[in-house]
Image: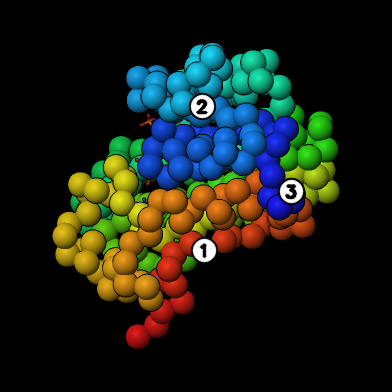
């Protein structure tokens, strides 16, 4: 269906060499977009860059530490000069610390808050002006289940993701009149580098037990939501948070 096509769109996925970001990058490419990714490590992005742009991988992967607003401004300028205006920005960078709140140090708190929340604020404000000037654009922020309920041993992560949902709504309210839509996805549990070794077996078990579908998600099950929010099919969808969690948040007792 044409309405889901990403033909002619330029997309940038920050965190695009990660588990979820990689799936989104491939789905956008398959949907017709020209896709680039960004992250801290060029070597980590090399394979994906070759895959996304075999003729010129240097225009498919960009180094950025998204915790630094000045680096994000530089990224926006470089990518615009290389590819043109970015039509779709995905904020898929993230980290976590699973530890009792009473043991979290200031540095550990800042790492999570800066990577997950501050970076989203400044990535959005770095790329939105180009979208506003063009009169169209879509931003997709990857939030988390943890935005919507208490998250024992991950308080800083949970707070940062609540902030992402809040930013999504505020930017949607501010830029909707300029044709820029800002939405979020709330993934449930998907096995990636983020949680593979950080989550204990018992925590993994609880994650599946509490999910209505009694399993973790397959990464490919996130692709449709990300394509939808980036596409014209979601032309009047702005400020929303789309849950892809197997019914986790809908489950009570
Ligand atoms: N997996 C889940 O179950 C789950 C559930 C809900 C939400 N999420 C969210 O989904 C997003 C992607 O996570 P994932 O599960 O795919 O984990 P992942 O595989 O570890 O990917 C995280 C990505 O973030 C990038 N990143 C980290 N710090 C960065 C920084 N300072 N600057 C730029 N990029 C940075 C990493 O690239 P470099 O290390 O190369 O910089 C990596 O590509 C995160 O926001 C996470 O919170 C995941």
Q: Is residue 205 left or right of residue 168?
A: left
Considering the numbered disc 3 on the image, is that residue within a helix, a strand or a loop? helix
Mark 1, Cα crowd under 10 Å, few <14 / some 14-19 / many 20+, is many
- Give 181 or 104, whichever is nearer the viewer: 181
The residue that appears at 68% across and 50% down in the rendered structure is 4
Residue picked out by circle 2: 52
The tag earlier along the polypeptide, 2 or 3, is 3
Residue picked out by circle 1: 243
Q: What coloring was used for the rendering?
A: rainbow
Considering the numbered disc 1 on the image, is that residue within a helix, a strand or a loop? strand
Asked if the residues shown at circle 3 and circle 1 are in contact, with their CB atoms under 8 angstroms apart, the answer is no
Residue picked out by circle 3: 2
What is the C-alpha distance between the residues marked 2 and 1?
A: 27 Å
Quadrant hosting ligand 1: top left
Query: Could you say which quadrant of the image residue 249 lies in?
Result: bottom left
Q: Would you say residue 33 is visible in this rendering?
A: yes
User: Residue 229, percent across and down?
Assistant: 64, 51
Name above or below for residue 11 compared with residue 166: above
Considering the numbered disc 2 on the image, is that residue within a helix, a strand or a loop? helix
The residue that appears at 44% across and 64% down in the rendered structure is 245
Foreground mark, 2 or 3, reads 3
The tag earlier along the polypeptide, 3 or 1, is 3
User: Residue 104, percent across and down?
Assistant: 25, 48
Q: Would you say residue 171 is visible in this rendering?
A: no
- Quadrant of the snapshot with the C terminus: bottom left
Name above or below for residue 2 compared with residue 64: below
- Give 241 or 31, whichever is nearer the viewer: 31
- Give 138 or 69, whichever is nearer the viewer: 138
């Amino acid at each position: 269906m044409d309405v889901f096509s990403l033909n002619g769109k330029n997309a940038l996925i920050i965190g695009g060499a990660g588990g979820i970001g990689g799936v989104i990058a491939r789905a956008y490419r398959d949907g017709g977009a020209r896709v680039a990714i960004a992250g801290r490590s060029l070597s980590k992005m090399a394979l994906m860059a070759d895959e996304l742009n075999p003729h010129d991988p240097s225009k498919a992967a960009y180094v950025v530490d998204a915790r630094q607003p000045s680096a994000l401004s530089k990224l926006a300028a470089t990518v615009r000069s290389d590819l043109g205006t970015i039509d779709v920005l995905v904020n898929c960078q993230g980290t976590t610390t699973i530890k009792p709140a009473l043991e979290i140090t200031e540095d550990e708190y800042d790492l999570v808050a800066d990577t997950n929340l501050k970076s989203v604020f400044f990535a959005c404000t770095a790329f939105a002006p180009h979208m506003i000037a063009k009169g169209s654009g879509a931003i997709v922020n990857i939030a988390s289940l943890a935005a919507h309920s208490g998250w024992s041993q991950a308080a800083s992560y949970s707070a940062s993701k609540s902030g992402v949902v809040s930013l999504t709504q505020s930017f949607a309210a501010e830029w909707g009149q300029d044709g820029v839509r800002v939405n979020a996805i709330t993934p449930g549990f998907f096995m990636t580098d983020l949680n593979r070794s950080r989550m204990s077996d018992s925590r993994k078990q609880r994650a599946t037990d509490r999910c209505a579908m009694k399993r973790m998600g397959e990464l490919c099950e996130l692709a449709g939501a990300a394509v939808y929010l980036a596409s014209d099919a979601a032309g009047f969808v702005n400020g929303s948070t789309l849950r892809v969690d197997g019914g986790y948040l809908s489950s009570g007792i």
